[in-house]
Image: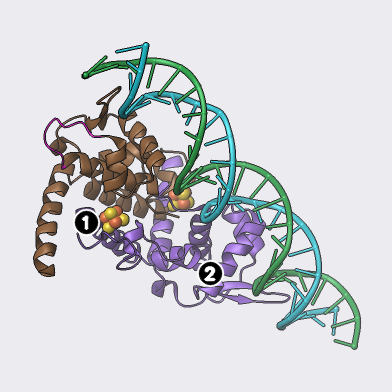
Chain colours: A brown, B purple, C green, D cyan
Amino acid sequence: MMRLTRAGEYGVRAALHLANQPEGKITFVSEISEKQDVPRHFAAKVMQLLVRSGVVRSHRGVKGGFTLARPASKITLKDVIEGVEGQIFLNLCLIKKGECPRDDTCPVHLIWREAQDKLMEILDGVTVAELAETGRALEKKMSKKKR
Amino acid sequence: MMRLTRAGEYGVRAALHLANQPEGKITFVSEISEKQDVPRHFAAKVMQLLVRSGVVRSHRGVKGGFTLARPASKITLKDVIEGVEGQIFLNLCLIKKGECPRDDTCPVHLIWREAQDKLMEILDGVTVAELAETGRALEKKMSKKKR
DNA sequence: TTTATTTAGGATATAAAAGGTCTTAATTAT
DNA sequence: ATAATTAAGACCTTTTATATCCTAAATAAA
Ligand code: SF4
Ligand code: SF4
């Protein structure tokens, strides 16, 4: 249906939550689940995917939990989303040459390539650190409005 | 999974096929199915969706079939895809304001808005007529290469 | 008017993906 | 040793994707 899955969305929320924690703090899934409105067990599963794809690091045992695997300024939105969903391809023929037998003579293929490149450019062009920053600015703005 | 469905893909092929037919020719689903490698019954269903959304026109009975509902130069790729799939939204929060309760303070929302706008700009920026033209040019190029 | 051909519309079927829960094992600070 | 926590994966339910099939309606032509 050409839409981000809930798992992908939750992964982004989790990464952003971790980026907003003080340097070095280890965070439980329970905290991520509560603060970010993510079903608890589902959150655990998504965190596992992010560990496997190298975006976050896990710490087991008492006082265990999760931290980002590297500085938030080195993690892009694309890293997080593809870490959860796997690589994104807007159409089959973008997966690899020959995946669609018509790709060498198909005019639509070129459009999909363009759309794919642009989407990747946008998602890879913003880091989790930048998002966290913008988020704080937005919070401040909205709380002013409410007063 | 953030990917065009087969139905959407087949719809585009069908529209392009119709655009390549001589002015006024009525085309059977059987022809579309065979020439565009689309399962026959599935093609029929996709064509129905395109009729309902006003992209193609149907003609019933003997000598019946399908034609484009308006000149190919007035039909964009977006018209065809959304005609089959319904409106595209890259994330839930783009459907409408308030669909996600966090949208007024969420930094990621802005990125999705940007990605959505760009995608729509690309898909709505090319017409079926232009695609058909490019397709003919590509065919010519490839047949030269083979010689 | 009858017939053959074609789409319309919807029922049905199957498989895959999405979304979510649960259990058990492994790890580790205390 | 124990309690807290993630790891791993089994399991479940719902929705979407993909596809097929059947009957009705339309209509050009015989
Ligand atoms: S857009 Fe063209 S190349 Fe891509 S899947 Fe469709 S037919 Fe194949
Ligand atoms: S990106 Fe932000 S606004 Fe959009 S669904 Fe996620 S949390 Fe909500």
Q: Which residues are magenta?
A: A20-27
Q: How many marks do you count on the picture?
A: 2
Q: Quadrant of ligand 2?
A: bottom left
Please name whichever residue, A21 or B126, is drawn nearer the observer in this view of the structure. A21
Residue at point 41%, 54% (across, down): A2
For disc 2, the marked residue is B50
Please name whichever residue, B50 or D7, is drawn nearer the observer in this view of the structure. D7
In the displayed structure, B129 sits above or below B112; it is below
Q: Position of residue C16 (x, y in %)?
A: 55, 42
The amino acid pointed to by label 2 is Leu
Q: Position of residue B69 (x, y in %)?
A: 51, 77
For disc 1, the marked residue is B106
Q: Position of residue B122 (x, y in %)?
A: 30, 61
Chain letter belonging to callout 2: B
Q: Is mark 1 within 8 Å of ligand 2?
A: yes
User: Predominant secondary structure in magenta?
Assistant: loop
Residue at point 70%, 74% (across, down): B63
Whether residue A105 appears in this view of the structure is: no
Q: Secondary structure at mark 2?
A: helix
Q: How packed is label 1: few (under 14 Cα within 10 Å), some, or many (20 or more)? A: some
Please name whichever residue, A92 or A87, is drawn nearer the observer in this view of the structure. A87
Residue at point 28%, 42% (across, down): A32
Distance CA(mark 2)–CA(mark 1): 36 Å
User: Any magenta on residue A16?
Assistant: no
**First along the sequence among labels 2 and 1:** 2
The amino acid pointed to by label 1 is Cys
Q: Which mark is residue A22?
A: none
